[in-house]
Image: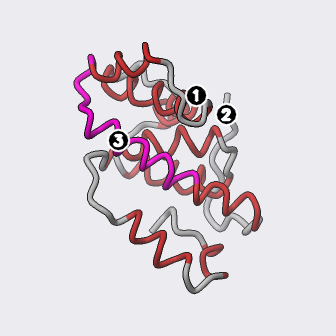
Amino acid sequence: MASASPAFAHSGNALPTYLALQNAKSSITGKAREVVNLVVSQLNECEYCLAAHTMVGKMSGFSDAQIMELRHGRASFDAKFDALARLTRDIAEKRGHANQALIDAFFAAGWTKENLVDTVVAIGDKTISNYLHGVTKVPVDLPAAPPLV
């Protein structure tokens, strides 16, 4: 699993708890989940998660250019993903106090209230692993994500 880093091994409790969260049912799955993962990992400057989710993003079908754009918090190549990326960035940056216009744009793009709640949970999930890597400094054992341009 790309986002369960070696840092979780330091606690007998953390990994099963985190895996329960990660493996829970969600309406934000597949490519949409990678949108959230890439946006949040970039915002939190998590080298390990950026490396992992750049790889998973490619396996999910995103191009290098699309991954770079997602890391900037937008997706001009897909209106629905763009609304998700923009809202995800805003929620994460503002610690849950999102701009109402971005929430409205999210719904206008076809997302539901269930998707909104699951997006917040996915942001929390990714924030946990980002913060864990930030404090443990576990070496990145994957190909590094390219620098943001």
Say whether disc 2 or disc 1 marks the residue closer to the N-terminus.
1
For label 2, the crowd category at 10 Å Cα-Cα, with few meaning under 14, some 14 to 19 and many 20 or more, is few
Is mark 2 in CB contact (under 8 Å) with mark 1? yes
Which three-letter amino acid code belongs to the residue tagged 3?
A: Val
Q: Which residue is mark 1?
A: 72
- How many other residues sit within 10 Å of disc 3, few (<14), some (14-19) or many (≥20)? some
Would you identify the image quadrant in which residue 20 lies?
Answer: bottom left
| Range of residues picked out in magenta | 108-127
The amino acid type found where label 1 is placed reads His
Across and down, in percent, residue 15 comes to 52, 77
Q: Nearer the viewer, mark 2 or mark 3?
A: 3
- Look at the picture and state if 130 lies above or below 142: above
Q: Is residue 41 above or below residue 103?
A: below
Quarter-wise, where is residue 31 in the image? top left
Say which residue label 3 marks: 117
**Helix or strand or loop: what does disc 2 sit on?**
loop
- Disc 1 crowd rating (10 Å Cα; few below 14, some 14-19, many 20+) is some
Q: Element under label 3? A: helix
- Give the numbered dot on residue 148: 2
The image shows residue 6 at horizontal and vertical percentages of 62, 75
Q: Is residue 112 left or right of residue 64?
A: left
Residue nearest the observer in this picture, 144 or 1:
1
